[in-house]
């Protein structure tokens, strides 16, 4: 047909090739097979367990609050690597203060400042992760419920993608600014030891967050696979990194989603500190929050421990409280 020839010619001029649906499926299966083979090679020297990598920029007060909630609520904690970007000496000094405060945390917390391009530094950090499983967090997250990381450390992410942020209570997408129904939930014998606290669902049954398996907001992945995808993907910073991972979402089509009966963490989008992606967020300035940190404050998130989120991100009114003395 004429329209097919026109489209094919336009795609060719742009340097692309138009594929049939069948050809696209073949290409996708070939890619998935290659990634699986590379993942198997990467997995050979990894040990059981889980490690967390936290992304942060100009948010010392928020990262302090996150780490405080992590130490207070997590049992069997995983070691963390905080990869941070400080745009001014004042922000850098604040991060150094946070690092000192958590130098004796229950699990090691290592701070790494971005001194080179994120896309170069991240694969280097991932190469140092020795555990089979990995999760990412961002600095505007706080833990709001007790969390035992045993499941995160033992689950097979190539079969089941565990989300710490999703739950059956979620009825709205903050980022999409719309109400949404959750998918159907079931109890799997694979997770029978956790009783009614763990439910499964199908990725892509519903939209928005329920079709976003490669979220960096508390989803548990295979370290080996993440290493491979991080070398293949094109990105500049954490926001485009997450989007780049979603280019491989077809890998998750045969994997079940897993979450808890209650969300274990919550994003508090008080502000936006990057211009790469125009994320919806509040308007509190990083400088104001830095001033509060310098005065000895952190966010008062204790009331959230009885709060039931209806969205993974909630723009709540949160006060300040004096930071506790840490040993």
Image (spheres, rainbow, N blue to C red):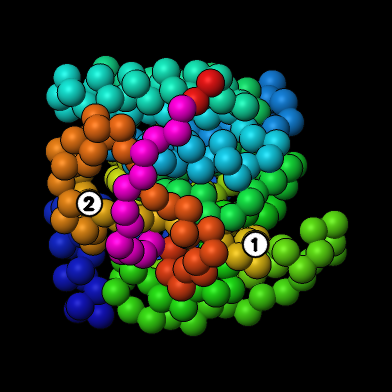
Which x, y percent locates residue 31?
A: 51, 46
Graded by Cα atoms within 10 Å as few (under 14), some (14 to 19) or many (20 or more), the crowding at tag 2 reads some
Q: Residue at x 24, y 30 (%)?
A: 294
Residue 260, numbered label: 1
Report the quarter where the N terminus lies.
bottom left
Exactly how many numbered labels are in the figure? 2
**Residue marked by disc 2:** 271
Depth check, front residue: 229 or 173: 173
In this rendering, position of residue 58 left or right of residue 261: left
Depth check, front residue: 132 or 90: 90
**Mark 2 vs 1, N-terminal side:** 1
Q: In the image, is residue 314 part of the stretch drawn in magenta? A: yes
What secondary structure prevails in the magenta region? loop
Vertically, is 113 above or below 208? Answer: above
Graded by Cα atoms within 10 Å as few (under 14), some (14 to 19) or many (20 or more), the crowding at tag 1 reads many
Mark 2 falls on what kind of element?
loop
What is the CA distance from the residue labelled 2 to the residue labelled 1? 27 Å
Vertically, is 24 above or below 75? Answer: below
Question: Quadrant location of residue 13?
Answer: bottom left
Which x, y percent locates residue 227?
A: 51, 32
Q: Residue at x 36, y 39 (%)?
A: 322
Mark 1 falls on what kind of element?
strand
């Amino acid at each position: 047909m004429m329209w097919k020839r026109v489209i094919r010619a336009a795609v060719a001029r742009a340097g692309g090739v138009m594929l049939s649906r069948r050809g696209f499926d073949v290409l996708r299966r070939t890619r998935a097979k290659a990634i699986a083979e590379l993942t198997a090679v990467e997995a050979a020297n990894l040990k059981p367990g889980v490690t967390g990598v936290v992304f942060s920029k100009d948010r010392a007060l928020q990262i302090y609050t996150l780490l405080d909630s992590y130490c207070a609520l997590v049992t069997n904690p995983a070691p963390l690597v905080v990869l941070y970007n400080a745009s001014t000496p004042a922000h850098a000094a604040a991060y150094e203060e946070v690092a000192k405060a958590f130098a004796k945390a229950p699990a090691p917390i290592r701070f790494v400042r971005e001194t080179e391009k994120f896309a170069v530094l991240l694969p280097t950090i991932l190469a140092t992760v020795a555990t089979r499983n990995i999760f990412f967090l961002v600095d505007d997250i706080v833990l709001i419920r007790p969390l035992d990381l045993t499941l995160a450390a033992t689950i097979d992410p190539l079969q089941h993608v565990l989300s710490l942020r999703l739950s059956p209570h979620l009825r709205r997408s903050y980022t999409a600014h719309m109400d949404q129904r959750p998918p159907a939930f079931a109890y799997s014998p694979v997770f029978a030891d956790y009783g009614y606290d763990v439910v499964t669902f199908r990725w892509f049954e519903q939209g928005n967050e329920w079709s976003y398996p490669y979220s960096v907001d508390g989803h548990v992945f295979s370290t080996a696979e993440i290493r491979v995808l991080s070398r293949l993907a094109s990105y500049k910073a954490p926001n485009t990194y997450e989007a780049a991972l979603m280019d491989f979402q077809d890998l998750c089509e045969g994997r079940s989603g897993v979450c808890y009966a209650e969300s274990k963490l919550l994003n508090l989008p008080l502000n936006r500190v990057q211009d790469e992606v125009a994320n919806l967020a509040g308007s509190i300035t990083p400088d104001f929050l830095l001033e509060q940190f310098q005065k000895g404050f952190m966010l008062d998130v204790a009331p959230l421990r009885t709060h039931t989120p209806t969205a993974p991100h909630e723009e709540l009114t949160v006060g300040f409280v004096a930071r506790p003395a840490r040993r």
